[in-house]
Amino acid sequence: MKQIVDLDKTTLMKLQMISVIEKVSSDDLIQKIVKFSVEELWLKKISGLTDEEKEDFGLLMLMQEADRNNKVSREEIFSILSK
């Protein structure tokens, strides 16, 4: 996904200097920086959650991964529950 990021001149110049030093393109460097920053924020937010909130969040993530087209019949559900 492409996004436009507005940077001030000083930050842009620093970014370009770092990209020259690191021998990578500015786009690749921005992607690495954003990925790193998001990971750090993610870990901080997750570590601050209670166990119950972590469980709720995990269930939400699993629900988003579920295939909505995959249906189970009522009989299958009750046969599993009756075991």
Image (spheres, helix red, strand yellow):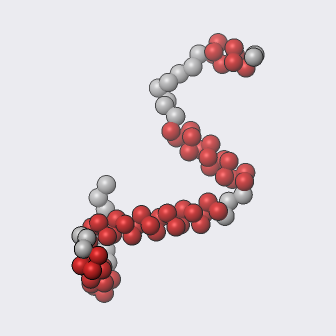
Q: Position of residue 47 (x, y in %)?
A: 64, 62
State the count of labels: 0
Q: Looking at the rendering, which quadrant does residue 74 occupy?
A: top right
Q: Quadrant of the C terminus?
A: top right
| Residue 34 appears in the picture as rendered | yes
Asked if residue 15 lies left or right of residue 68, the reply is: left
Q: Residue at (75%, 16%) from the top-left corner?
A: 82
| Residue 12 appears in the picture as rendered | no
Q: Residue at (49%, 63%) from the top-left corner?
A: 39
User: What is the residue that sits farthest to the right in this orientation?
Assistant: 82
Q: Position of residue 34 (x, y in %)?
A: 40, 67
Asked if residue 32 lies left or right of residue 12, the reply is: right
Q: Quadrant of the N terminus?
A: bottom left
Q: Nearer the viewer, residue 20 or 67?
A: 20
Asked if residue 12 lies left or right of residue 63, the reply is: left
Q: Position of residue 19 (x, y in %)?
A: 27, 76
Compared with 55, 28 (above or below) is: below
Compared with 41, 62 (above or below) is: above
